[in-house]
Image: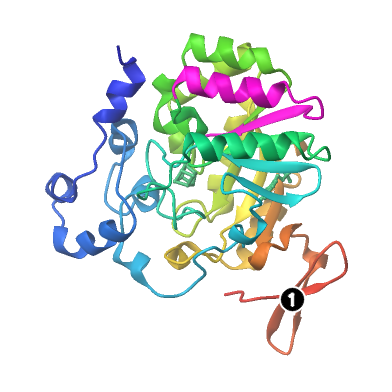
Amino acid sequence: MAELWQRTLKDALTDVDELAERFNIDPQSLTPVVERYPLQISRQVLELIEAPGDPVWRQFIPDPHELAEVGLVDPLGEENLSPVPSVVHRYPDRALFLVSGSCASYCRFCTRKRRVGCAGSSPSFRELREGIDYIAATPQIRDVLFSGGDPLLLPDAILGDLLNRIHQIDHVDIIRIGSRVPLTLPERITPQLCQLLRKFTPLYLNTHFNHPRELTIEAVNACNLLADHGIVLGNQTVLLKGVNDNPAVIQELFFKLLKMRVRPYYLHQMDLVRGGEHFRTSLATGLEIMASLRGPISGLASPHYVIDLPGGKGKVPLLPEAISVQRGATLIRMASGEMVDYPDL
Ligand SMILES: *Cc1c(COP(=O)(O)O)cnc(C)c1O
Ligand code: SF4
């Protein structure tokens, strides 16, 4: 029998006409967007929208701007860093294991817009097996990040089997899971799931909250249950224009996360993904927000502000001294000293 969360998920909004009717908007302008990048919004997220254009709306409602032909289809150059289709291996000691191709709700700014939610994006059993074999055969990897899509959309039996196989590999010391279900499908965080996850200690789970309004009672309860089972919680926030690009919103978000036992880990500069340009902010905005945290808010609530450089060059902390402007062009200094051109706004 399907579990409650599976039934809730089936009830998610995927139909443009229903969306248009609900908010009294024109379905015609959205149909081509949704044909290219799928629409799915869980009921929990839908209920959080108070008015068109608000911070939740902006993240989840399709927008004709997504069809702009600017930006990169694969902004982080992940396809070139995939030894097998289900693994992205950029740093020697850690690798992404892409175990799921779908999410409970699709964020319009997603870095993996090119594939998440699209036909054929869910890894086959063979691809998952190849991923496990690659990780088992690569002794430098000691930290495996389950990602996707959303790993927690896998049923307990499959997720448990994958975790078990990775956990059994001698050289893997740490497992991490990246998931947005504490917001988008909080029912998924069941006591059974938490009991399953606790077997794989040390297990880190990174949530993804972008606005204080997302910290619903259900989300708080889901995080509490995870934390009570010994799962260490962190959060990744994406800096998004018109959603959270101001100091007061970010301060409130990070402080409230800390109260929920979720440590702000990364604040991501929006990457150059095609179809997400309308979400991008300038580096100055991010730096100003980071500066506003120093002093008013505990260091525990101050994440690293990072950019994932285009072309697979990796994450760089955006400290003021790493950024320079020469003849109108913005350059970012990597740890290696290499200077990389960045099309700042
Ligand atoms: C972000 C990322 C990681 C994890 O990096 P941390 O800084 O350790 O969180 C690993 N692999 C890839 C490809 C990544 O993009
Ligand atoms: S939850 Fe993560 S992977 Fe899924 S659509 Fe949102 S950003 Fe992309």
Number of on-image labels: 1
Left or right of 26, for residue 90: right
Question: Residue 93 at x, y = what percent?
Answer: 80, 42
Residue at the spot 50% in from the left edge and 51% down from the top edge = 244
Res. 229 in view: yes
Residue at the spot 73% in from the left edge and 33% down from the top edge = 136
Q: Could you say which is closer to the camera, residue 160 or residue 183?
A: 160
Left or right of 197, for residue 170: right
Residue at the spot 30% in from the left edge and 43% down from the top edge = 40
- Under circle 1, the secondary element is strand
Q: Could you say which is closer to the camera, residue 88 or residue 3?
A: 88
Question: Residue 18 at x, y = what percent?
Answer: 14, 44
Q: Which residues are magenta?
A: 155-179
Q: Could you say which is closer to the camera, residue 64 or residue 58?
A: 64
Check disc 1 and report the residue beneath it.
Answer: 331
Left or right of 321, for residue 34: left
State the image quarter where residue 286 is shown: bottom right
Res. 207 in view: no
Residue 175 inside the magenta-drawn segment = yes
Q: Quadrant of the N terminus?
A: top left
Q: Quadrant of the C terminus?
A: bottom right
Residue 208 inside the magenta-drawn segment = no
